[in-house]
Amino acid sequence: MLFVFMLATFVGFQVIQNVSRLLHTPLMSLTNAISAIAIVGAVLIAGEQESTMTTVLGAVAVAASMTNIVSGFLITDRMLKMFREREPKR
Amino acid sequence: MLFVFMLATFVGFQVIQNVSRLLHTPLMSLTNAISAIAIVGAVLIAGEQESTMTTVLGAVAVAASMTNIVSGFLITDRMLKMFREREPKR
Amino acid sequence: MIHGVTQLTYLAAAALFILSLRWLSHPKTARRGVAAGVGGMSLAIVGTLLAPEIVNYSWIAIAAIVGTLIGIPLSWVPLTAVPQRTALSHAFGGLAAGLVGTAKYMIWFQHGELTRFRTGAIVLEIILGYLTFTGSLMAAGKLQEIVPTRPITYPNQNLVNLTLLAIAVGTGVYLTFHPYTAWAFPVIVFLSLLFGVLLILPIGGADMPTVISLLNSYAGLSAVAMGFVLENKLLITAGALDGSSGLILSIIMCRAMNRSFTNVLFGAFGQVQASAAAVEVKTAKSGTPQDVAELLTTADRVVVVPGYGMAVAQAQHKVRELYDQLTKRGIDVKFAIHPVAGRMPGHMNVLLAEAEIPYDALLEMDDINPDLPQTDVALVVGANDVVNPAARHDKSSPIFGMPIIDVDKAKTIVAIKRSMNPGFAGIDNELYYLDQTMMAFGDAKQVLGDVVKSLTGEGGTH
Amino acid sequence: MIHGVTQLTYLAAAALFILSLRWLSHPKTARRGVAAGVGGMSLAIVGTLLAPEIVNYSWIAIAAIVGTLIGIPLSWVPLTAVPQRTALSHAFGGLAAGLVGTAKYMIWFQHGELTRFRTGAIVLEIILGYLTFTGSLMAAGKLQEIVPTRPITYPNQNLVNLTLLAIAVGTGVYLTFHPYTAWAFPVIVFLSLLFGVLLILPIGGADMPTVISLLNSYAGLSAVAMGFVLENKLLITAGALDGSSGLILSIIMCRAMNRSFTNVLFGAFGQVQASAAAVEVKTAKSGTPQDVAELLTTADRVVVVPGYGMAVAQAQHKVRELYDQLTKRGIDVKFAIHPVAGRMPGHMNVLLAEAEIPYDALLEMDDINPDLPQTDVALVVGANDVVNPAARHDKSSPIFGMPIIDVDKAKTIVAIKRSMNPGFAGIDNELYYLDQTMMAFGDAKQVLGDVVKSLTGEGGTH
Ligand SMILES: NC(=O)c1ccc[n+]([C@@H]2O[C@H](COP(=O)([O-])OP(=O)(O)OC[C@H]3O[C@@H](n4cnc5c(N)ncnc54)[C@H](OP(=O)(O)O)[C@@H]3O)[C@@H](O)[C@H]2O)c1
Ligand SMILES: NC(=O)c1ccc[n+]([C@@H]2O[C@H](COP(=O)([O-])OP(=O)(O)OC[C@H]3O[C@@H](n4cnc5c(N)ncnc54)[C@H](OP(=O)(O)O)[C@@H]3O)[C@@H](O)[C@H]2O)c1
């Protein structure tokens, strides 16, 4: 697992360094949405039905992550829609 | 392990794409040396002493890999030594 | 623990996340990047739902619906509120990580399945998660100005904070070696929550963007820790992507402001604004919007330098109108974007894109600076620190060494702002007193509107 | 299976390999990259030696010494022989992978520990390994001209080859599902060895560089397969790095030659050289080295375009002398490096670097092309295809569409080569018949030497 972490960190650094400055704000919201991958853990806890307590904790975590997923992707897309190239010269 | 492969491939593609054209020949010999990492497998086989046959196979593999390691790194370094920037204007 | 299909969906999801960020590197492919991100996330969720451990779907469904219902309106916030939204999001992310860690601890505690490795990973996860939770809430509050934005300091603050953190970490280490110490867990949770608040208190509202990026990085790392807890490589990968993104962005911001992390986190920057009053009385020339319009029409090359003031005034659409008027007259108009203009990375780009200014008219600092000496008019719209020449020569200035846009080298300069007040760094700007500078006082939207009006009136077009 | 310390050294080794390649991205940090690579390799070896399975070190030590003794002289080869050396290296790499796979199969066979997964991974490893072994040997032979370099073809060749490969893969699949089928293993080994030879036979000597890169990629993939066999993540990582590097380089070469993989592998390129004889009789002007020297002294801007002929003639040192003479006279000299000039990627760069020409005087094709119309003299030293204007306009030419260096746009052109013979692609070059072109016939080293002599004689310096 350390291997995966090491490699993913390299990938992350390289990929992010290549993102143009132009898009740093959308980048922030996109990584924000991706970090909501925590939903995977939350779903596992909420679905396992170990005890009411853990199910509730899991469900709250699912809701919180889902909020991030939905709002993160939507707002990124909204911002990106605004970026457009110069239209062909009139 | 598929995960490791996937991530390493991404890292590989990104890293190699960033290598300047100037250095493509040294790049070939450096990756050549790195691919001699097969020595790890060869050492395990040769050192396990399972049977004479496998030990011999392993030892040949160790020798072959070692050749690549030594010649690969040495020649890369020899080539790189030749690259130098314009000396400060005289 | 995780069966084959799930594993494969996770693999694909991780690849899609990486592609998503790769595609974001250029505006042309960026929207494909969002699609890849959505695809990756959907795969990850579907893959998880297929896992055999999941016996009950109703709670998950309800929670997902609630989350969606909160998420949709959250994505409608105006662009000026994006930093707050991001901070709030990090708070949710941190909360989710913290809760999952807590629940997992409880489950393993019950079943007697806690090992040192598991406990250690959980401790890391909850410290980072809960700290991110309260820290991000505070940051959002400061940005929204619910919490006072000025740095709140008291004696020995750093000592107190670090002691708190040390106790939390110490307890965590103890718990790792004695996983069934029931009292330790809530103590760590409490200390982490508290530390998140205290960490943000002494940081000025204007430093929040850097802090948010850092919190982004923490949120990513807590997902990584969760990945170690659940032995899930997708979580590790996505978390690492997120962690490195946050770290890189905060490094970029710090570097562009020529400050160090320590200075941002412990510097209580923005506290001493009052002391920066001008001592000698200097005079600045000021002009009316009509004067500005006249000056602009005689120019061949114009460089517009937007800053935080444009964002505050929401003046980007007026900037666009001005751009249209000028280009229609054959004047070459470029935009000079400083990396930390505004209050978040890429702030100006998003605003100008919103106003449908083509992104290839936006130039980065290093690309535009060589052109400035050939520029007839540099139009500074609500920017201040990023054009302050003191950064180049005044060693005593707090922004000394920060790279700036060299508008002072342009032939003439027009600066639009409401007053002679300083900007974010709280320091005077000698630019405004130069001979070739004309101030146009007023709200940026108002002033630009008047400029455009007098251009259209005069030109007879429109 | 692998204990903690070994795991950690593997982790560090993998990180070092990645850093090694990252540092190679710029000449300034490149040598640090080699150091990182050596460090990573040493760590990996030490980590492996620490593994508890290893009971006997003497065989390993002897083998390592033998390998070192072969490796050191192999690194002394002249730079023109680097492609052969690389091919030979791949052969060793493939052999090692094949042998390890074979040995592992034997061990698991004996112990009854073969599973489908293990067998499948071994099959992949040995097919790739042995194919790379013989294929690379053939490639090295062709480059060294031990084996005839022209494509060797016979009817239905592709069909025969593909059938062979299909049988090998089919047997491999069978073996995967019936791991203890003793006869299948040697069959696969034999077919892979044979396929490696047959694959290379129909490929012309000049296409070898692309093939070598592809074999590089196979060698990497066989290391990956070995990683799956031994459940070793370091092997997977290093193999993947290698595999992607080989793939990217061959793609770059193919693209720069405007050809497809299929065409390189099955096209039997370079076979029809004879048919390309010139039909109409055209005349080219030729000049003496003194004429060339005179022309050069009157120029302000000179662009030197080196090609394979410079490598053959080992003329790089003379090029350097010429460069010194001309810059001494205040003439601006640049080098235009085509991505596939010579016979391997970066060939010209290494040669010119060997002659100590500063690398910032070397410009890539896309950077120099806009300057050529303002160039007084374009000096073509043993380049042919990469400056053939037919690539731009003659749709029927085999190199049509390949990007070229636009020397025909320069004010005057000097081309140094031994005859009017075609280059690698076997086609005539209209460049030599242009009005503004002067041919200087002879060996490049000889001609340049004379040019330099008449420059020094004339100028009285030196
Ligand atoms: N971008 C980032 O990521 C980031 C992150 C952290 C910190 N920062 C910091 O933020 C600063 C950004 O520099 P900047 O030049 O963009 O902004 P600034 O230095 O904060 O100056 C903004 C100026 O806009 C004027 N203004 C405010 N509202 C206005 C309105 N409605 N109409 C017209 N003008 C208005 C203000 O002057 P009046 O009050 O006189 O109108 C103020 O001087 C830098 O110091 C940077 O270090 C940026
Ligand atoms: N770089 C790579 O990675 C790579 C890989 C695969 C294929 N290729 C191919 O290789 C070719 C490279 O183009 P190129 O322009 O560099 O070379 P080229 O087209 O092969 O032409 C080389 C020329 O050099 C002349 N020459 C040979 N020996 C000489 C000597 N001793 N002194 C003076 N001249 C000599 C030859 O003419 P005379 O016989 O008249 O002297 C020949 O026309 C391209 O077609 C490319 O596609 C390159």
Image (cartoon, coloured by chain):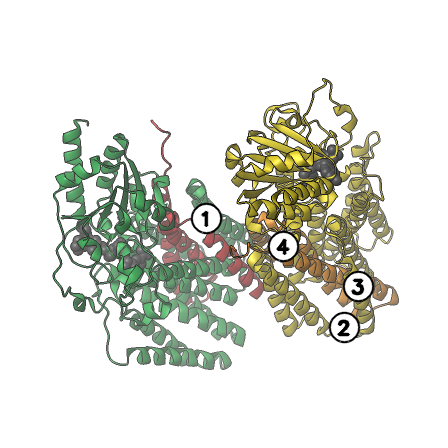
Chain colours: A red, B orange, C green, D yellow
Task: Return the x and y of residue C64 as percentages of the image width and height.
Answer: 38, 53
Residue type, mark 1 in image: Gly
Give the residue pinned by disc 1: C37
Q: Nearer the viewer, residue D241 or C229?
A: D241
Residue type, mark 2 in image: Ile
Query: Is the distance from the Cβ of mark 1 to the nearest ligand 1 atom less than 8 Å?
Result: no
- Label 3 vs 4, first from the N-terminus: 3
Give the residue pinned by disc 2: D54
Residue type, mark 4 in image: Leu
Give the residue pinned by disc 4: D241
Q: Nearer the viewer, residue C433 or B50?
A: C433
The residue marked by circle 1 belongs to what chain?
C
Question: What residue lies at 77% left-to-right and 39% top-to-bottom?
Answer: D205
For label 3, the SS is helix
Give the residue pinned by disc 3: D67
Quote the CA–CA distance across marks 3 and 2. Answer: 20 Å
In the image, are marks 2 and 4 on the same chain?
yes
Disc 3 or disc 4, which is closer to the eye?
Answer: 3
Quote the CA–CA distance across marks 1 and 4. Answer: 25 Å
The residue marked by circle 3 belongs to what chain?
D
- Label 3 vs 2, first from the N-terminus: 2
Question: Where ligand 2 lies, by image quadrant?
Answer: top right
Tell me: residue C309, above or below residue C172.
above
For label 1, the SS is helix
Task: Answer whether labels 3 and 2 touch (C-beta < 8 Å).
Answer: no
Few, some or many residues within 10 Å of mark 1 (<14, 14–19, 20+):
many
Disc 3 or disc 2, which is closer to the eye?
Answer: 3
The residue marked by circle 4 belongs to what chain?
D
For label 4, the SS is helix
Residue type, mark 3 in image: Gly
For label 2, the SS is loop
In the image, are marks 3 and 4 on the same chain?
yes
